[in-house]
Image: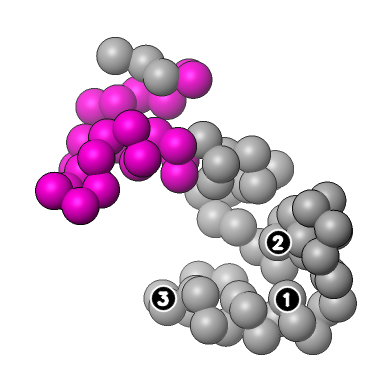
Amino acid sequence: MNYYGINSKELEKYVTANLPLREVIDFKRIFNQIDKNLSGKIDVKELKETFIRIGLDGRQTQMTEIMGILDNNNSN
């Protein structure tokens, strides 16, 4: 089944008792909106653009610090 262009079978591996499929689909949909280059990762530039778009400060030093906190596998 497809929800908003997202294959639910692909997402079922993330479903738990505390995180139902509907929420996984919502998170994936939001992630896809932020991941402009469709790399499967959110980079500093995409994070900064998102912050600015929602009215938050997008200073580079803050974005780098946030990515360091969130990027637990050091992929960015």
Q: In which image quadrant can residue 45 be found?
A: bottom right
**Residue 45 showing in the rendered view:** no
- Residue at coordinates 84% horizontally, 70% vertically from top-left? 58
Which quadrant is the C terminus positioned in? bottom right
Q: Which residue is mark 3?
A: 73
Residue 2 in the image, given as x and y percentages of width and height: 37, 16
Other-residue count near label 2 (Cα within 10 Å), few / some / many at <14 / 14–19 / ≥20:
some
Secondary structure under the numbered disc 2 in the rendered image: helix
Q: Which residue is mark 2?
A: 47
Q: Give the amino acid type for the residue marked by disc 3 in the picture.
A: Asn
Secondary structure under the numbered disc 3 in the rendered image: loop
Mark 1 → mark 3, Cα distance in angstroms: 17 Å
Q: Are marks 3 and 2 in contact (CB under 8 Å)?
A: no
Q: Are marks 2 and 1 in contact (CB under 8 Å)?
A: yes
The answer to which of 2 and 57 lies nearer the viewer is 57
Residue interval drawn in magenta: 4-28
- First of labels 1, 3 by sequence position: 1
Q: Are marks 1 and 3 in contact (CB under 8 Å)?
A: no
